Amino acid sequence: MHHAPSAPPSGPIETRHGACNLCEAICGLTFQVQDQRIISVKGNEADPLSRGHICPKAVALKDLHEDPDRLRQPMRRVGDQWQAISWDQAFELVVDGLARVREQHGANAVAVYQGNPSIHNWGNVTHGHLFFNQLKTRSRFSATSVDQLPHHLAAYWLYGHQFALPIPDVDRTQFMLVLGANPLASNGSLMTAPDIRARFKALRERGGKLVVLDPRQTETAAIADEHLRIDPGSDAAWLLSVIYTLFDEDLVQPGHWAPLLDSQEELRQAVSAYSPEATADHTGIDAATTRRLTRDLAQAASGMVYGRMGVSTQEHGALCQWAIQVINLLTGNVDREGGALLTSPAINLIQMGLMGKGHHNVWRSRVRGAPEFGGELPVSVMAEEMLTPGKGQIKALVTSCGNPVLSTPNGQQLDQALQGLDFMVAIDFYLNETTRHADVILPPTCFVEHDHYDLVFLHLAVRNVARYNEAIVEAAPGALHDWQIYSELAQRYARRVWSLDKGRALQRVKGMASRAIMARLSPQRLLKIGLKRAKSSITMDQLLAHPEGIDLGPLKPSLVASLSKRKRRVNLLPTLIRQELPLVQATFLSASMSKAEGPPLKLIGRRDVRSNNSWMHNTTRLVSGKNRCVLWMHPQDASARQLQDGQAVQIQSRVGQITVPVHVTDQIRTGVVSLPHGWGHNRPGVNLRVAQAHAGASINDLTDDRATDRLSGNAAFSAVPVEVRAA
């Protein structure tokens, strides 16, 4: 195994530019390096997007690189032990294992799960598809259906493309209404906005207003002009009441959208049951406040509604994200400076046709009948597809940069399902709660050991920039980058499958030739080709000359022009939404009745700036200090259960039970409790020594795989019914 050098550094100190790709903020950094050892990490003041901002995660890049628990060569499981093997052996084992399952049970018996970090590393984006597409499976899953699928579905319905995601123009807006999001902890999510605290401060200094609706006083809510503690799971009802008010008070002013909007009158009628007066008891937001905020938004010089995890991960997630877009459209704030706009990155994957438009419900899952979206099934059905016998049962799994045992609903069920697989391979550099079930682990290089260009997050950034960075330190001899792993797997697997399918030989040979050419091209070469193909104003030479990044200016209106050019109109009331609204009304009535009977507590998630994903818990720097895996509970709820601050409590849901300390605080709404995600490092067979010493418990041992958004299939993590009692 390769470890950081132990001899004292003696060579010259060099300053190198890089980026932190541990979260969506992609902050620009400067590294000081001596003898291939990182000695300091700082924010880059010259970066046009992050402007010198840095959070604790970026400093931990050094820790991740030097972590002695990080795998640095392929590993093979032999019983309960792990054995280091060569890359050649590893590739042959993987190809043989996957091909064998495909031969015996069919292509759909091989599943793929891609975690969030898959799009943080551009080698995954450029080359992962070479291998995954070879598998020819419909059993594809990703973290998309854990947190953001409703966004893509709403964009697909309204604008015709799943990645047509208008980004809040936070630097120029006058009014920002935030639901179920905590940008101060996330640095923006589906809104790449580093240094968001300073951006919100500037909003207030120019006379603007920030309003937050959240059951908890988050870091963002604490600095807002106004914070309203909405009842979890009721966001859809409140958003519908805003649409109702826009019509009821003649506040609809779509402006430049007017010629493109269809179904306005039908929409008015469809929301007629959702007046602020009718929804107030359900949401906890009184009618006068709802009407006032609706007027403030409609009458602001510019503004927008922005909603993220809290509204996406609930029973009506797709309805929420559709309603947010409709509100922004009816107030003329989409494709408007200070509202929400599409980005204009140097490499626009949407315009180049490299991001699929999407499709919905073309097929359904075998057991539950859940709809696919964009070629993926909701991750909530993954375990049942492994556990339920019959044709098409998942027998093998490939995971890429993911830990679904800790990040997807009902993790204990998935833990059980993984034990029964015939074969599993993980592309990951940790032996974690998921990869411990693998037969083979293929570890790619760490973030500072390879070059980087953000192909995805620059499509979500609040300012148009371009930044390419070369590797900060050299990779160990014999190490492979993720793109090299995918390229080799793609070619070897294609040869194996081709040899078994002589009837399609010519097609296979042509495909193999194309893949072979692609596999030889590094991400950097592809970037250079892409810039030329996109006829970008930025060249590779300019990127190399400006590693701090190149400023391409503020976001610009483009969506209306694009839709008009394609002669595409916007149907404000898609068929599935039209069908859903009467069902939602019945749900709200049922919820109001059960509320009167005294329901269980509602569990919501929580995010900390030092804890984006579970694998960040193996660095002492990020887990030091007070225990963060604690259950927040309001004093009234604690008193009713005779619980004291710091006491161990049992939390029980339909699917499981965990024990954690309770933190009694008035910073959360009564009837609601909150637990952070990503913890639960107490399972056997894991080699994460720091994380195991701060194990905590997994919120996803409580979240319910049966609780999903009916329209999208997205996991409904928010407002999980739980009982809490003394341990």
Image (cartoon, helix red, strand yellow):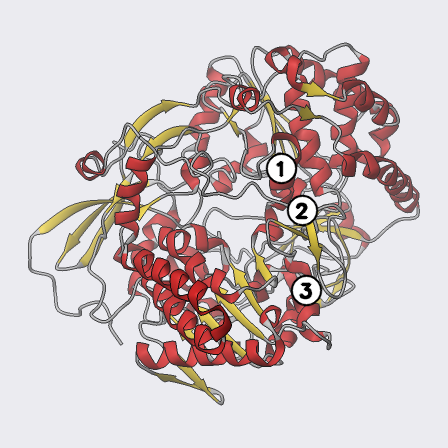
Instruction: Tell me if residue 624 can be seen.
Output: no
Q: How many labels does the image show?
A: 3
Q: Distance between the residues labelled 2 and 3?
A: 25 Å
The nearer-to-camera label among 2 and 3 is 2
Residue 551, image x, y percentages: 30, 27
SS assignment at label 1? helix
Q: Earlier in the sequence, mark 2 or mark 3?
A: 2
- Going by the numbered disc 2, the residue's amino acid type is His
How far is the residue under mark 1 from the one under mark 3?
29 Å
Determine contact: label 2, label 1, CB under 8 Å: yes
Q: Mark 1 or mark 3: name the one nearer the start of the chain.
A: 1
Q: Is mark 2 on a helix, strand or loop?
A: strand
Query: Where, quadrant-wise, is the N terminus in this rendering?
Result: bottom left
Residue 156 disc label: 1
Kind of residue indicated by mark 3 = Asn
Q: Which mark is residue 360?
A: 2
| Residue 714 in picture, x, y percent from top left | 67, 50
Disc 2 versus disc 1: distance between alpha carbons?
9 Å
Residue at numbered disc 3: 410
Q: Which of 522 and 53 is in front in this view?
A: 522
Name the spot of residue 374 as percent of width and height, x first.
59, 49
Instruction: Give the left or right position of residue 159, taking residue 500 as reference.
Output: right
Tags 1 and 3 touching, CB below 8 Å: no
Q: In which quarter of the view is residue 443 placed? A: bottom left
Say which residue appears at 53% left-offset and 38% top-offset. Answer: 163
The three-letter code of the residue at mark 1 reads Tyr
Q: Residue furthest bottom?
A: 79
**Rendered position, 666 above or below 103:** above
| Residue at 39 percent of width and 69 percent of height | 489
Left or right, 727 with reference to 623 = right
